[in-house]
Image: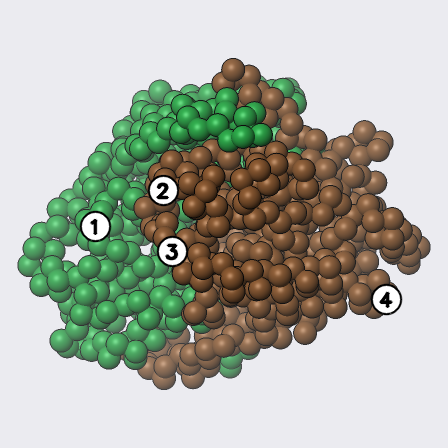
Chain colours: A green, B brown
Amino acid sequence: MLQYENDFIWNKDVNITALMDDVYQKLVTEKESKIAGYYTLGEDSLPLVDHVLENSQTNRYIQQSDTIVVIGIGGSSLGTKAIYSVFKHRYKNAKRMLFLENPDEIDLYEKLASIEKEKTIFIVVSKSGSTIETISIFKEIISRFYLNYEQQDRERIIAITDFDSLLYKFAQYYKIKVYTIPDNVGGRFSVLSAVGVVPLTLAGYDMKSLLSGAATMANSFFEKKENHLLEKAVFLTSHQKEYPMNVVFSYANCLEDFTKWYVQLWGESLGKINKNAQHVGLTPIGHIGSVDQHSFLQLIIEGPRDKTVTFIKLENFEKNIKIPNISLKFIEKADYINGYTFNELIDGECEATKESIIQQGINVDEITLDRLNEKNIGKLIMYYELLTSLCGKIFNIDTYNQPGVELGKQILLKKFN
Amino acid sequence: MLQYENDFIWNKDVNITALMDDVYQKLVTEKESKIAGYYTLGEDSLPLVDHVLENSQTNRYIQQSDTIVVIGIGGSSLGTKAIYSVFKHRYKNAKRMLFLENPDEIDLYEKLASIEKEKTIFIVVSKSGSTIETISIFKEIISRFYLNYEQQDRERIIAITDFDSLLYKFAQYYKIKVYTIPDNVGGRFSVLSAVGVVPLTLAGYDMKSLLSGAATMANSFFEKKENHLLEKAVFLTSHQKEYPMNVVFSYANCLEDFTKWYVQLWGESLGKINKNAQHVGLTPIGHIGSVDQHSFLQLIIEGPRDKTVTFIKLENFEKNIKIPNISLKFIEKADYINGYTFNELIDGECEATKESIIQQGINVDEITLDRLNEKNIGKLIMYYELLTSLCGKIFNIDTYNQPGVELGKQILLKKFN
């Protein structure tokens, strides 16, 4: 279960209800027109899970593997990694996942050194099918591990890409297993498509529960039962000048990669030139509590009032480790917390921080997960995707493209030609 | 060697030279008055390295250890972790370091499970001496590992704290080794004091070279040979309204923890109410290239023009892994990079991204490290500390306190009493 609390102070004279209705309608239209296809992935991807599981039964390379290497960058890795990081402490029997993202030699070298070809499935993920970092790293793997993709090693490889992309053609030609990403699902909205579902299912994660959580959230939204989402989108967009930044403060270390996924989703979707030629967008910033209270809270409280803050917290961790009833001579003032769990301490810190921020008149909202399970994470993913689409509609932009990064790619190409 | 390039477009009518001279003089005065003591740590901490090394020779627990556990949060861990992360790929014979920071049960449980008491040195770091997270985690360690700090295990423990703090008194009482942090060195400026020097030297890192790099930078600055720093401080502070955010884009994975250190240093130091009761500050955002080009670049280029961007890049990685001369059928368009190293690819991406951002009229500066060595990282640390102090002086704030976080601490205390 997810619970929501919005503590917004509306400085603007905004006709909130009208705007909420309007943007809701626009999203309904977008969903029905199938311009964006992620809305229904919670249901659409279910057969994929079964397909992957069946395929695993008959592929002896998958059976023998203990490592899944994902070669991909940006939208091709961030979502998968987010889910992997949230649950990896729990799945003790799952396969290890390794993400080869950055063409950073030190990082790459360390990771490659830990790979045993005989126990590894290599998944190449590129929506466009020719991402330079991804294809280059794939070549290094072919070379280093004598990976014969033309014949005997082809079953160690899986490609995930757009239908008919260059990578798709390559995979088809060599009879490498290939999964496609729906045309109307953008890279950063693709975690619930084959992009996330295939590697995580192979690794042993319960993706059906996660998908069902996402479906529940999407359906509930389109049944107009998630008004808090509409309210939040209207608030954030109508105050973008006053509050150009949204800080997500997650009170659990395992959500750190989730905040990175959010940063991409939010930043790349909303940072656009709109139809009136204005630069719009909201800058996403991810932090982890309580550790980043010691680095970023001072700025939120006393610095410029240019941020909204979203708290994400867990009601129940699984461990419930009690702070021992030990009194250290001279440090007795720290004993007030003895006998409480670390969970209660971190939860108390989240609440205390939130209250101190609210007292300053800073705009805050909170998402509470009653448990850290697949269903809730599926909901949370869909929550953020819907929120992003809503903000994009209000900003009057194309939420799903990224024209701004093209120039850099062209300059890069010229440098090496 | 570090090289600097500032590409600033001065929108403001600012008397740059006068401001640069003025803030330089203020820093000279601050250094001479010893209000802030970090300026000379590059020299002051050298004897500490020798002391730690000598102590290691005679302490059999240190001799037998293969793990250094640092229990600390915020300024007590971020700098140490930053240096550890930069070099850990290189020091294959160094002791493993483990950072217990967040009272997050899942994370804590995983890390505690990997500790063998007989092979571990536990370093408790708290400037105030009673940080609730740190003391609580220390209690858990005492309880879980039957750590007899009163007698036979005292030599497995080291405390690092302010002179005469509660932790200091505790350590003195039980004859636990204690190192102090100079009074005039704030937590987030303390990495070159005992806070970073003791654990990293124990682990086997070459802290003398790092300290000498820091000293070189500080001396060069005070000899007025680092005008680029003055210029950058004047630019960033005089344009804080137009550009409230500074994005540091580091093109090396091993600098990720360094950017977290920068975020604390920058955020907590500069986010303040100034002497005219104005909220001032600059929001620090850390990203890693090229991976975050796929998540954040679009926002920089097309979103609101509210950011300055700093590139940090390495001229030489150590590996020089060449992208193999392999041509994948149908994906031949990615072959333009074949035969170049991954280093050249990431460097090319950095340059291409920088050029594309500059073409948009966005303010950019760049710091280039010719090599990833201790000396350069020492310089980089001092560079950022000096820059922070300069900006603080221009903002007319107390750079070294953090009054904004007190309210949350009081609310927390009430919750458990």
Q: Which residue is mark 3?
A: B119
Q: Are marks 2 and 4 in contact (CB under 8 Å)?
A: no
The chain letter for the residue carrying disc 2 is B
Vertical order, B306 against A246 (above or below):
below
Vertical order, B128 against A271 (above or below):
above
Tell me which amino acid carries mark 3.
Lys
Which numbered disc flags the more N-terminal residue, 2 or 4?
Answer: 2
Q: For the residue labelled by badge 1, is the local secondary structure a helix, a strand or a loop?
A: loop
Tag count: 4
Marks 1, 2 in one chain: no
Residue placed farthest to the front in the image? B151
The chain letter for the residue carrying disc 1 is A
Q: Which residue is mark 4?
A: B223
Instruction: Measuring from the top left, give residue A208's x and y in whole percent.
Output: 20, 39
Q: Separation of disc 3 and disc 2 at Cα?
A: 12 Å
Tell me which amino acid carries mark 1.
Ala
Q: Which residue is mark 1?
A: A94
Q: Is residue B20 left or right of residue B116?
A: right
Q: Kindly report which numbered mark, 2 or 4, lies closer to the viewer in this rendering.
A: 2
Few, some or many residues within 10 Å of mark 3 (<14, 14–19, 20+): some
Q: Kindly report which numbered mark, 4 or 3, lies closer to the viewer in this rendering.
A: 3
Instruction: Measuring from the top left, give residue B268's x and y in whole percent.
Output: 66, 41
- B231 and B206: which is toward the camera: B206
